[in-house]
Amino acid sequence: MEEIHAVIPVSSEESAQVIDNSMQSIQQLEVPSGSRLHVHYVVDSEDVEKDLRLSETDYSGINSYFRELEDGTKAGALNHMIEQLDSPDYIAIFDVDSRPSKNFVVECKNALDSSENVFLASCPRKIINYEQNLVTKMAGAEFDLFNDIQHINDRYNSFNTFNGPISLIDGEYVRNNPFDEQVACEDIEFVQEAYLNGLRTKMSDETYVGEQAPLNLKDLYFQKIRWMTGALESLEEHAKDFALSDRSLKIKMGWFASVSLPFFAGILSILFPIFSLRRNLKGDSIVRSINKGVALFLFSWLVMVCGLVVIKKRIFNQNITWKSPERENI
């Protein structure tokens, strides 16, 4: 019997309703024949004894663990849970707002098992609150673009990463290679290290994960500040590592593009008509395609501004703050 463990970190600011919605979604996951799924929620709390969020949920077969930490890191929560698991075959990682399709584990396992050097498998993302406002539409256009880029990278075996990392990961690998709790973005750091060790990721087109976009410009701004901080750290820490590694040129170029091009995203915004045309060819209406193109144009400039802010803060040795985003109860 193969043991599959789903781990979902929960910050101290998440509501009971969001946790409840997450549990409903995760409980519907299907697993391959001969496999068994274990679900673990790692909940950070300011005061464990007074925290009643989980008392409002009632799901059998779900394990919940509290950490009395107000500002615990996601990487710390993942490591805390994974190190307690006894020889897991696979680890599935989700955010509390992740809404995976029922076949996520099945299809990602097929992708993960397709090659010995694949250590992580994931899939396209969809914004579940896309129609909420302009900010959610900007995030939705971003995800459409990322999905296209990830498809290309996967097809040509280039460097490919997935935020979160919302994915299914080889259990032995993640047990022996814990997440870095000191970096801004533990997901890209985790994937970079694996690529430098000769491994790669794989993308499945047969499933998807829904997730919430930030609801307001402030939350989107702080999210991109964190992501751009992770990109800058990657350039600082791993440029030499990739340059001197024996990985293929397309992996090196793919990595460099993924961590450097966001700093020039505003310049690339002139390509938004091509993006709109592609969305139309993939089934979106003309109006929706144009709206997505405009949203991507605005998003590109926001990302470049965030990159400039991160560079300025690094030059002047200023702290970069991060806050949990506001969420809808969906």
Image (cartoon, rainbow, N blue to C red):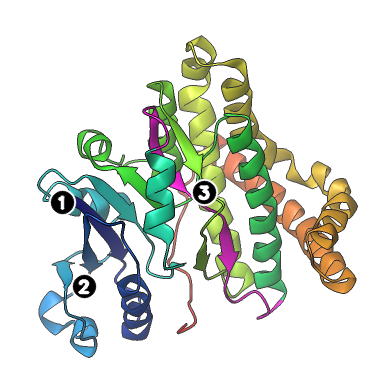
Up/down of 256 relative to 33, above or below = above
CA neighbours of label 1 inside 10 A, class few (<14), some (14 to 19), many (20+): few
Spatial distance from mark 2 to mark 3, Cα to Cα?
Answer: 38 Å
Q: Is residue 130 magenta?
A: yes
Q: Amino acid at mark 2?
A: Glu
Instruction: Give the residue drawn at x 24%, y 54%.
Output: 4
Toward the viewer: 126 or 90? Answer: 90
Which range is magenta?
114-133
Please tell me which residue is depicted at 61% across the width and 74% down the height of the picture: 216
Mark 1 to mark 3: distance in Å? 24 Å
Which residue is tagged 1? 1
The three-letter code of the residue at mark 1 reads Met
Instruction: Give the crowd class for mark 2: few <14, some 14-19, many >=20 residues within 10 Å.
Output: some
Asked whether residue 158 is drawn in magenta, I would say no
x and y percentages locating residue 170 in the rendered image: 30, 40
Residue 7 quadrant = bottom left
**Taking the image as drawn, is residue 184 in sight?**
no
Instruction: From the image, tell me which residue sits under label 2.
Output: 46
Question: Quick one: SS at disc 1?
Answer: loop
Q: Nearer the viewer, residue 107 or 200?
A: 107
Would you say 232 lies left or right of 120 here? right
Q: In percent of the image, x 17 and y 70: which residue is there?
A: 64
Q: Which residue is mark 3?
A: 204
